[in-house]
Amino acid sequence: MDFTSRQFRAFSLVAQHRSFSRAAEALYITPSGLSVLIRELETQLGFRLFDRTTRHVGLTSSGSELLGVVRESLEKFDAAVSRVGQSAAEASLSLSVGAPPLVAANILPEAIKEFRSNRPDLRIRLFDVGGEALTRLVEEGKLDMSVGAFFKPAPGLRRTPLFRFSLMVIRPDNDLALRRTSTTWSALKGEPLVSLAPGNLVQQFIDRHLARAGVFVHPRAVFNYLETMIAMVEAGEGNAVIPSFVLPACRNRKVVMSRLINPIVNLDLCRISLRGKKLPPGADDFTSFLRTYIARWAGSAGIL
């Protein structure tokens, strides 16, 4: 049988008020409309719920037996609707953002802190995720968006550029002669270089441009994370080619940075999100803020 919550509410209200007219007012319908609901319910059940006269409305024994079950069901339904509604409202004010560990640690925390001063209602949940998981988690709907440099095409994803960076070389800060704002790719020949693991997409991008410049590298050491590599450059393990968006992680290290030229190699820091999925309210506001926030420090750095 297909019963409706409206039928059950009509039944419960008539039993509560012992009046069709007062129950109709509580349900915001006409008494005749209420009578139709009760009559349909009784027809579907196959028994009468009320004994009614012009002066009196009372439950039948069958109606009394059914009333407790109906009220319990309505209470559970209302509680579930309230709980789900609250969860949906909270979800609409929450934005999940993925980013590589270095970006998550050195760029986004201050950006989120500053953004929160203008939008305290929006909760931003940050997930530090490495490699291709940034893309996969967005594709699976587990993240609203990810921020990073994305090299592989993904037809199901929308790509929104945040800022155009370039590649640069970092060296330990122990030689005044190395403190120059730019370096040619060909000047890297013979320099001791360290790198990221060969499977890293950023390193694959860097290696392609090293090869085009005729720089063939046998790295002195290989690391899994950019931040580790930067620390090892500071320690004198070697020099490294890195994207300039990691500049914030270099500021607290004794390394010197030079923009690579002839040619300048650009790469974009982007936001990716799932095509066809409506982002939570505030996602576009945060993206616009992030674009301005990054441009503020990146534009003044001089080597980007």
Image (cartoon, rainbow, N blue to C red):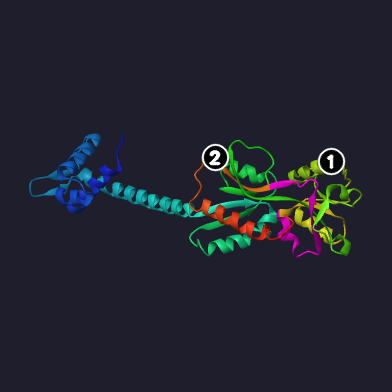
Q: Secondary structure at mark 1?
A: helix
**Horizontal side of residue 49 vs 297, given as left or right:** left
What residue sits 84% from the left and 41% below the top? 211
Residue 11 is situated, as x and y percent measured from the top left of the image, at 23, 46
Comparing 272 with 297, the one in front is 297
Q: Secondary structure at mark 2?
A: loop
Residue 189 is situated, as x and y percent measured from the top left of the image, at 90, 48
The residue pinned by badge 2 equals 275
Question: Closer to the N terminus: mark 1 or mark 2?
Answer: 1
The reply to whether dot 1 and dot 2 touch (C-beta < 8 Å) is: no
The quadrant the N terminus occupies is: top left
Q: Which mark is residue 302?
A: none
Comparing 250 with 35, the one in front is 250
Q: Dot 1, crowdedness within 10 Å: few (<14), some or many (≥20)?
A: few
**Horizontal side of residue 148 vs 145, given as left or right:** right
Q: Is residue 42 above or below residue 245?
A: above
Q: Is residue 125 above or below residue 132?
A: below
Query: Start and end of the magenta stretch?
Result: 245-267
- Asked if the stretch drawn in magenta spans residue 172, the answer is no
The residue pinned by badge 1 equals 211
Residue 37 is situated, as x and y percent measured from the top left of the image, at 21, 40
**Horizontal side of residue 48 vs 265, given as left or right:** left
Comparing 179 with 36, the one in front is 179
Quadrant of the image occupied by residue 45: top left
Residue 260 is situated, as x and y percent measured from the top left of the image, at 79, 51
Q: Dot 2, crowdedness within 10 Å: few (<14), some or many (≥20)?
A: some
- Asked if the stretch drawn in magenta spans residue 254, the answer is yes
The amino acid on which the numbered mark 2 sits, given as a three-letter code, is Arg
The amino acid on which the numbered mark 1 sits, given as a three-letter code, is Ala
Q: Residue furthest right?
A: 190
